[in-house]
Image (spheres, grey):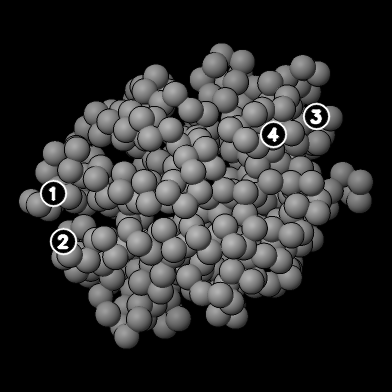
């Protein structure tokens, strides 16, 4: 394990708008599929996040803003009072432990199956283009269902779902929200031309394809103010059958427009190591140039590479997924140069507390 310099920027405080972060180690959103009762978080979820309150900022697992936005079994929502009450357990626990926490707002769009949709209706998408592959459903593993294209008159209603989710997140005691515009879900589907073949005001040019992202951003910043809103993007990600003919142009435009709307941070998924690392030129430097707020790097970082990225000015903050899942005290392990717990991938999704709240901290290992 790397022993960082005592003055490493990774371990220094950071002022994110009105929020004082104790370090620049963020907990990235990670689906855990443990919201089994009404898609609402329970006491174990409160324990899980509170254990990780030493993060500079926690971003929760993706949380659907409507029943139509569901794409997986037992993922949490933020569209009912019961769900908001469940999330209040989480925010109270994290704040009591001295942490800060944002809720990630999510609509999966076409990445779903009729068995997960209200009335077994087709999932919605910008265009009627199905995702290739299979997903896990209450009926077992099934091919993704063919989506239907949203009618122009329906889109404002979906934007309103994000705004209502933002209001419920505020009522649940969060410190802010992040829009999930990455990984092939609905916002990303509108943004990229591989999944958006519309010929109306929401398709064609990059300005039109970014319209949905920007309308959702404006609706949510209208609830929270821009400084407490972040946006996550994945410019080169192919997950969920995604592609774009010119990601540099598409995502540079998105970053520039988000910057003009003064959102608090841009969270960019572009792995620097592992099987998903891009072989060609990176897009992150272009987005860093276009976006004037805080820039969050994500994907395959360890302590050494995160320290390097911050030291070189490539990012202001770095988020960690699986390392935080398995190491509730990750910033302290980075500070001490301590070893990391091995993640148990068999318990990533669903199940009980094993592989969820039982990873040891340094003081108990």
Estimate the x, y position of residue 315 in percent, counting from the top left. 53, 24
Gap in Å between the C-alphas at discs 2 and 4?
41 Å
Q: Mark 1 points at which residue?
A: 201
Quickly name the residue at label 2: 152
Whether pointer 3 and pointer 4 mark residues with C-beta atoms closer than 8 Å, the reply is no
Category of crowding for the residue at label 2, using alpha-carbon neighbours closer than 10 angstroms: few (below 14), some (14–19), many (at least 20): few
Relative image position of residue 187 (x, y in whole percent): 33, 51
Residue 19 versus residue 79 in the image, above or below: above
Q: Which mark is residue 335?
A: 3
| Distance between mark 3 and mark 1 Cα atoms | 50 Å
Extreme-right residue of the structure: 363
**Total marks placed:** 4
| Marks 3, 2: nearer the viewer | 2
Q: Can the viewer see residue 157?
A: yes
What residue lies at 76% left-to-right and 59% top-to-bottom? Answer: 93
As drawn, 71 above or below 37: above
For numbered disc 2, what is the local secondary structure? helix
Q: In this view, does 243 lie to the left or right of 217?
A: left
Sequence order check: which comes first, mark 3 or mark 4? 4
Earlier-in-chain disc, 3 versus 1: 1
């Amino acid at each position: 394990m790397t022993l960082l310099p005592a003055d490493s920027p990774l371990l220094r405080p950071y002022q994110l708008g009105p929020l004082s972060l104790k370090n620049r180690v963020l907990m990235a959103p990670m689906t855990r599929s443990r919201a089994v009762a009404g898609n609402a978080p329970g006491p174990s979820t409160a324990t899980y996040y509170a254990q990780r309150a030493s993060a500079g900022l926690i971003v929760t697992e993706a949380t659907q803003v409507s029943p139509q936005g569901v794409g997986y079994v037992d993922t949490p929502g933020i569209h009912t009072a019961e769900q908001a009450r469940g999330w209040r357990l989480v925010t109270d626990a994290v704040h009591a432990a001295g942490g800060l926490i944002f809720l990630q707002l999510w609509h999966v769009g076409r990445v779903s199956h009729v068995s997960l949709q209200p009335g077994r209706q087709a999932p919605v998408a910008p265009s009627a283009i199905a995702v290739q592959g299979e997903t896990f459903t209450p009926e077992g593993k099934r091919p993704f269902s063919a989506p239907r294209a949203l009618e122009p008159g329906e889109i404002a209603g979906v934007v309103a779902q994000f705004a209502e989710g933002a209001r419920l997140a505020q009522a649940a005691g969060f410190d802010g929200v992040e829009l999930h515009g990455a990984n092939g879900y609905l916002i990303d589907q509108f943004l990229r031309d591989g999944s958006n073949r519309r010929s109306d005001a929401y398709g064609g040019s990059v300005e039109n394809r970014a319209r949905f992202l920007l309308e959702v951003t404006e609706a949510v910043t209208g609830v929270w103010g821009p400084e407490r809103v972040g946006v996550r993007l994945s410019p080169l990600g192919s997950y969920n059958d995604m592609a774009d003919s010119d990601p540099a142009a598409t995502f540079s435009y998105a970053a520039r427009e988000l910057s003009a709307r003064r959102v608090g941070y841009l969270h960019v998924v572009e792995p620097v190591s592992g099987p998903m690392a891009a072989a060609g030129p990176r897009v992150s430097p272009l987005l860093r140039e276009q976006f004037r707020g805080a820039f969050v790097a994500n994907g395959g970082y360890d302590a050494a590479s995160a320290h390097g990225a911050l030291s070189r000015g490539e990012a202001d903050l770095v988020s960690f997924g699986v390392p935080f899942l398995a190491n509730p005290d990750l910033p302290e392990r980075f500070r001490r140069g301590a070893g990391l717990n091995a993640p148990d991938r068999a318990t990533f999704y669903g199940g009980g507390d094993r592989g969820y709240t039982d990873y040891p901290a340094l003081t108990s290992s």
